[in-house]
Amino acid sequence: MPAHASLSLQLRKILFAAILFLTLAVVIYWVILENKPWVVPEEYKSLKNPLSPSESNLNVARQIYGNECTQCHGQRGRGDGPEAKQHYPLPADFTDPKLLKSATDGEVFYWITAGRRPMPSFKRRLTPDQRWQLVLLVRSFSQPTPTNSVPTSPLKPAPEKSNHQ
């Protein structure tokens, strides 16, 4: 075998090993990064939502949520949207009261503002008021519905009640 062929084979083996190592390192880093807790800066934790949960604020939030969030988080915030299973980590289930119980409004606002892969940042896509409106809606997903009312989708109006029996 010529000397240059042996060198070429060695070079290819080294290059292959380097690419394999680099790929493995990136995957390990990604897994570690994705499983880290979502660290919210202190200045966000104490923020209070300046908006009230009025019907007008919730209606605006429903429209934004329908356009930006349902594909992953689902219509009712369960994390079961049509694209949810394509992502890792899976989208949050906002109907789980434990998820939002310990989170301040400022923390939820930060999650929406900053995003974290696979969720995009909405800092430049939505105004601060729109993000605060989403905080109101996200919190509403974990609120119990009265037992005598018909549950409605947060994106659709309640069905008309019929007087016929």
Image (cartoon, helix red, strand yellow):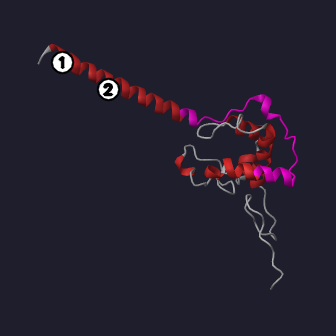
Q: Is residue 123 left or right of residue 79?
A: right
Give the Cα distance between marks 2 and 1.
15 Å
Quarter of the view holding residue 19: top left
Asked if disc 2 and disc 1 are in contact, CB closer than 8 Å, the reply is no
- Quarter of the picture containing the C terminus is bottom right
Q: Is residue 22 left or right of residue 60?
A: left
The image's mark for residue 62 is: none
Front residue (pair 80, 163)? 163
Amino acid on which disc 1 is placed: Ser
Q: Position of residue 15 (x, y in %)?
A: 32, 22
Q: Position of residue 131 (x, y in %)?
A: 77, 41
Callout 2: 10 Å neighbours few (<14), some, many (20+)?
few
Amino acid on which disc 2 is placed: Phe
Front residue (pair 113, 97)? 113
- Mark 2 residue element: helix
Q: Position of residue 26 (x, y in %)?
A: 47, 29
Q: Classify 18 as above or below 50.
A: above
Q: Which residue lies at the image location 78% right of the left edge and 60% below the top edge?
A: 144
The image's mark for residue 16 is: 2
Q: Which residue lies at the image location 32% right of the left edge and 26% below the top edge?
A: 16
- Mark 1 residue element: helix
Callout 1: 10 Å neighbours few (<14), some, many (20+)?
few
- Residue projecting furthest to the left: 1
Quarter of the view holding residue 122: top right
Q: Is residue 161 magenta?
A: no
Name the residue tied to disc 1: 6
- Quarter of the picture containing the N terminus is top left
Q: What segment carries the magenta color?
A: 32-61
Q: Is residue 40 magenta?
A: yes
